[in-house]
Image (cartoon, rainbow, N blue to C red):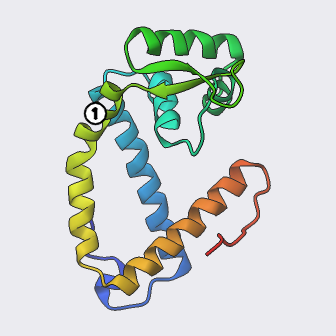
């Protein structure tokens, strides 16, 4: 929620520092959301982070890859995967292209639970976006894509700014 003192609300153009601070506040709110959502789904922090990676991955992840993403050794990742599988949150599957490789998939119940918990937030964000024109939404989407790319490059150790592909 805004305090009513944001530069755009005061009629002034936001400085890069204002936008950077707003992004910082978004990241802090997202971290708090992770804690809240993990609790609502009855997942511990590592379990929640693992499931979040599985739910948002662009390609199927294996146990070792998942462990690396959440900062666990392969042994600890296997224990985590075993725990999530026993709890009904994920299933192990053979990779379609390499039958020797196991991939991890969220179960339909896990997907449904996450969707149910996130629906009120999605609705609220939809209402916020309705207040912007199509051109504004395109600009916002492009900006957020570029911010994500900057975060990904930083996390990969490159640290530099690189514009996202349009």
Point out the image quarter for the C terminus: bottom right
Residue 161 horizontal side relative to residue 76, left or right: right
Q: Name the residue rendered at 54%, 15% in the picture.
A: 81
Query: Residue 89 at x, y = what percent?
Result: 40, 20
Q: Which residue is mark 1?
A: 112
Q: Is residue 102 left or right of residue 46?
A: right
Mark 1 closeness class: few <14, some 14–19, many ≥20 residues within 10 Å: few
User: Could you tell me residue 142's position as x and y percent?
Assistant: 52, 74
Residue 128 sits in which quadrant? Answer: bottom left
Above or below residue 104? Residue 148 is below
- For this rendering, which residue is in front, 156 or 1? 156
Image position of 64 with respect to 144: above or below: above
Along the line of sight, the residue nearer the viewer: 154 or 17 = 154
Q: In the rendering, at what x and y percent does residue 115 appear?
A: 28, 40
Point 29% across, 80% down: residue: 132
Farthest right residue? 158
Q: Secondary structure at mark 1?
A: helix
Q: Is residue 89 above or below residue 26?
A: above
Total marks in image: 1
């Amino acid at each position: 929620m805004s305090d009513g003192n944001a530069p755009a609300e005061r009629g002034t153009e936001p400085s890069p520092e204002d936008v950077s601070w707003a992004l910082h506040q978004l990241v802090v709110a997202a971290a708090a959301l992770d804690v809240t959502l993990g609790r609502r789904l009855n997942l511990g922090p590592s379990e929640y982070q693992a499931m979040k990676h599985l739910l948002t991955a662009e390609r199927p992840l294996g146990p070792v890859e998942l462990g690396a993403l959440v900062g666990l050794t392969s042994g600890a990742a296997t224990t985590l995967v075993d725990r999530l599988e026993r709890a009904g949150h994920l299933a192990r599957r053979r990779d379609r292209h390499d039958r020797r490789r196991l991939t991890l998939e969220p179960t339909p119940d896990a997907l449904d639970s996450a969707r149910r918990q996130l629906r009120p937030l999605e609705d609220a964000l939809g209402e916020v976006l309705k207040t912007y024109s199509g051109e504004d939404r395109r600009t916002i989407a492009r900006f957020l894509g570029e911010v994500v790319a900057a975060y990904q490059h930083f996390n990969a150790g490159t640290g530099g700014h690189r514009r996202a592909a349009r």
